[in-house]
Image: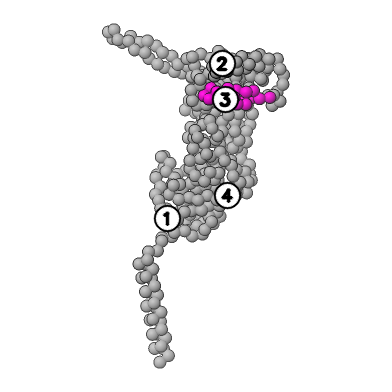
Amino acid sequence: MNLKGARIALAVQLLTAVCASLDDPTPISDQTNTSVLNAENGTLSALSSASEDPQLCQKKSNLHFDSEVRFGEPITVHFCNPQEPSDDEVPWIGIFKDKARLDMKRMPRTSLVHAWLNDCNSQSECLERTKAGVVEFSAKDPASSWYNNFPLHTGTYRICFAKEVWKETLINDSGSAQRWDVDHTHKLIGKCKQLVVLPTKDKMTRQAKVKSANGRYFVGDDIIAMFDSPVPVPNQWIGVYEKNGTKKHGGPPEGNLMCKSHLWAYAGCGNQEGDQLESRSCAERKKSGIVRMNETNLDNDPVCEAKQWPIPPGKYYLCLNFHNYEPFTEYKCSKKEFVIKKRRRKKDKKRRTSRRRQKRTTSRIRHKRRQK
C-alpha cells in the first residue's frame, strides 16, 4: 500500500476509534496506545489518543493534563479540537506564564508564551489535520520552547489550546493597482487551564555536591569538575565562577547567577551542544560524573559580556545549576575554591634559581664571617 493509501486507511481507523471511544468510560490511564502515522516518513508510532477520553470531545474539556507536575518532569497534554480545522487556521497548544492572572476564557499575550507546539506535536508545519492527539513539552525532541527553556521554573502557568487564523484581503490602491494584505490573529479554542510546577525537592540541592578535581590550575589548563546529583534534571549544568566579591573573605557566588559564569557545560552531556537534533538541550540525566571544561565552553551568552580565554588568574568556585533560564537561583556551589595561577616562564625560573643561589652564597659568606 502506498503512503497516501496508508493515510486514508489509518484515518478511517482513527475516526472509528474516536466514535467508539465517546461511549467508552475507560479512563485515559487504563487505555491502550493507538498507532499513529508519521506524515514525514510514513512510519507508525505508538501514541495515546486523547480522543479516547469521552470528556475531551464534549462541550467543556478539550484539554487534559496533570494540573501539578514535579520540577523537571515532562508535561503531556491531551487535546480534542471541537471545531473542524480549516486551511486558514493553525491549531496549537501553548504554555503561558500566568503573570496577568487573566480570565481563563481570554487569550493571553503571545509575549507570555513559554513553550508551544502545533497540534501535530511539532513546531514545524503540520501536513495533516488533527482532530485529537497528544503533545509533550520537555527537553527532548521535538523542540517545544524558546531558547531551551526547560525545565519550567516553580510557579503557576496556564495551558491554552489556540489557533492562528490567517486572513487575506484584496486592497485597491490609488489608481488601478491592487495588492493582497495578509494578517493573522490568535484565538482560543475553549478555555485555558492552570498548570502548577511544584517546588523542587529539598534534597535536590541540599544533597548535591560539586567540586574541582584539582585545587590549583595554571592559566590555560582544562578545569575538571566532579559532581553528585541525587535528583538530576534535564539541562542541568555546571559553571565556573569568580569568588564572591561582595564579601570580605570571598566565598561562593550568591543570588541570581545570570551572566556570572566564565565557563559552562551540561552535566549530563559534558558539552554545550546537548544531545538533541532540533535544539541544544541535554535530556540526559546523570546522578554523578566528571565534566572537563576549556576554551570550547566559554559562556558567550549574547545578552552578557563576552568571556575571554584563558581565564585570568584568581580564585574560583564551581556551581551545579538546576535552572536553564533566568533567573538562575536554584544551584549548589562547591565548598572549596580552586586557584588559577600564572604559568611560569623558563626565563623566570632561571632568574628565580639564580636569585636563590645568590641568597645561599650570601648566607654562607655571612655564616663564615661570624665564625671568624
- SS category of the residue bearing label 2: helix
Cβ atoms under marks 2 and 1 closer than 8 Å? no
- What x and y, as percent, mark residue 11? 59, 16
* Display colour scheme: one colour
Badge number at residue 43? 3
225 vs 77: above or below:
below
Which of the two discs, 4 and 1, labels the residue nearer the N terminus? 1
In depth, the one of 52 and 249 nearer the eye is: 52
In the picture of the structure, the residue carrying the numbered disc 2 is 5
Cβ atoms under marks 4 and 2 closer than 8 Å? no
Which of the two discs, 4 and 2, labels the residue nearer the N terminus? 2
- What x and y, as percent, mark residue 317? 50, 53
Q: Residue at x 51, y 40 (%)?
A: 274
Farthest residue in the front direction?
1
Identify residue type, mark 1. Answer: Gly
Q: Is residue 77 visible?
A: no
Q: Residue at x 70, y 15 (%)?
A: 23
Magenta stretch in the rendered image = 32-48
Identify residue type, mark 3. Answer: Thr
Identify residue type, mark 2. Answer: Gly
